Each structure stands twice: as C-alpha cells, then as structure tokens.
Amino acid sequence: MAVNLKKLDLNLLVIFEAVYSTQNISQAATRLAMSQPAVSNSLARLREMLEDPLFVRAPGGVEPTVRARELIVPIREALGLIDRQIAPAGDIDLATYKRNFRIIISDNLEVLMMPAIARTLAADAPGISIECVQGDRNFAEEVRSGKIDLACFPFPIDTTDIVTKAICPLDVVVVSRRNHPGINGVLDLETFCRMPQIALGRELRGLTNIDKALVAKGMERRIAYMAAKLWSIPPLVERTDLIGMLPRRFVEAIADNYRLDIHEVPTGLEEQHAYMMWHTNSEHDAGHRWLRESMLRATLLN
C-alpha cells in the first residue's frame, strides 16, 4: 500500500531511526528525551501507516523486521539530507543538549581521551551520556547500522560510507617488572626473543601489525600467556617475569600506577596509527561533531 506522505509526521521517522539504532524502546526514549509511552505510541502510528510491526520483542529489547531493515537506509539518508540542509551552524548548548552516545574505543585510547570528556559531562553537560562497548572485527557493521555512533580503533575501515581519520601514532614499547633479573641494561634482540611474554589473545592481537612485522623480520615472540584485556597486562608484568608490548602513550599514562621498566623494542617496526571512524550521515550532526572534536582535542593534549 502506498503511504500518503501528506500524513507522514517526520518525527515518526526520527523515532524509528532511534529505535532501530538502540534496538531498545527505553534507550531510544532516553536518546530522544521522550517518555517511553510516547515512543511506543509513535511506533504504533508508524506501524499502522506502514502495515508492518517494524520491531518485535527480543532479548534485551527489540529487533527489526525485514520491512524495517529495508527502510532504515533510505530513512537515514533522508534524515541526513534534511539535517545537513536545515541544521543551524555552530555548537550545541551543553547545558540543555540531551543524548546518549554509544562508542567503541580501545583501552589504550580510552585512558587518553575519556578523562577530559568525563569531566566535561559531569560539570557542564548533565543531559549527555556516553556508553563504551566492546569492539571486534565486525565493528564496521555496527557503525554502518547506527548502533555505534563512533569507533576509535587501530584498524581502519576503507569504505565510502564511513569517514576514517588517523588520530595519533601507536608506536609500542616493551615493559618489564622493575629491575627484572633477566634484563641487563638495554634490552637486546636475543633477550627479547628468548623471554616469555604476555600478549592479547589472537583475535585482538590480529587487529595490530606487531606480530606480522616481527615475523616479516624473521622473529617470533615467545608468548606464554594471552590476556583478554589490555589492562590485564601491566599488573601481570609487574608481578611476574613476563615481559609485554604496549602502546607508548598508554604506558606513559599509567606509569605512576605500576612498578614497571620501559624498554625500546630492539628492532624497528612499521609505524601504526589509531583511527577515528563514523558514518557519513553523522558528518554534519552538531552533537556528533562536538563529541569527535572533543575527543580529538583530548588526544592532542595528552
């Protein structure tokens, strides 16, 4: 059945997009600064108009129907076009702006970027919240679907619908416990290859080029323990004879919290970068622009 556009309320599409992105009625209501019943009532109107349930109950919220999946891309394109054409230039008013951002950010970048952002939220932006979620190799699809507003990762996306910006180098150093008995002064290549190491699990480690670069030079680390999180490496290194490799700026940020010695990698590695990525539909969104510019500014100051 054809939809009478004269009777279509644009707000219904905004609400549809929010529910699709969050896949949760309550979270969509929070994001839109609406009550949950108001969101549910609006969805009911759109369901009646389109003659489709659009969303069905699922663990933790709702999931879109086939019809909703068909509609989301053109609706986002339409909303993005409208926003770019009529949204006023300038900054958002932090005191009154209401929004929940969902982002993916690797541990080493979170400790650099987010303290300054968290202080701003607590002091000046009572209506803004940020939810950090765990990322994996499929994070591009979450950015594309709108479930994730922004991702910061050492793994760039090369597609035309996602903006990718290099934000800082990610050179690595070797860390050991203070006064490690197996390291005499400067860490040499033979000692580095011989000593047991702690590293991230294979899947997370595969998102970096460290091991690939070492293998290309005819070397291979002796990995004795694989950790699930980057934050597990410093305390385990501090309390064992294992050594590890971590991003330099991450180590510098946490240096006062652990008794560690820092060593240069005894062989040159190709420089890596961290990347910030977001969907092109968010390029001119004033709130989104505030978030990414604030995070970039925090990175430069650390």
Image: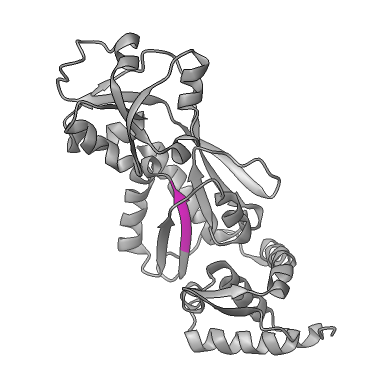
Q: Main secondary structure of the magenta part?
A: strand
In the rendered structure, does residue 102 fall within the stretch colored magenta?
yes
Task: Name the residue at the right extreme.
Answer: 2
Q: Residue at x 40, y 42 (%)?
A: 109
Q: Residue at x 46, y 25 (%)?
A: 211
Q: Quadrant of residue 187?
A: top left
- For the point 41% across and 60% down, the residue is 130
Q: Would you place residue 54 above or below residue 185 in this image?
A: below
Q: Position of residue 158 (x, y in %)?
A: 66, 40
Q: Is residue 149 visible?
A: yes
In the depicted view, which residue is nearer to us: 220 or 98? Answer: 220
Residue 93 shown in magenta: no
Residue 190 appears in which quarter of the rendering? top left
The answer to whether 301 appears left or right of 257 in the picture is right
Q: Is residue 238 above or below residue 288?
A: above
Look at the image and tell me in which quarter the C terminus lies. Answer: top left
Residue 179, position in %: x, y? Answer: 14, 20
The quarter of the displayed image where residue 170 is located: top left
* Image position of 203 with respect to 267: above or below: below
Query: Which portion, as a residue range, is magenta?
Result: 101-105
* Residue 25 in picture, x, y percent from top left: 51, 78
Instruction: Look at the image and tell me whether residue 270 can be seen.
Output: no
Pick whichever, 120 or 75, lies toward us.
75
| Residue 176 x/y as whole percent | 23, 25
Q: Is residue 275 above or below residue 151?
A: above
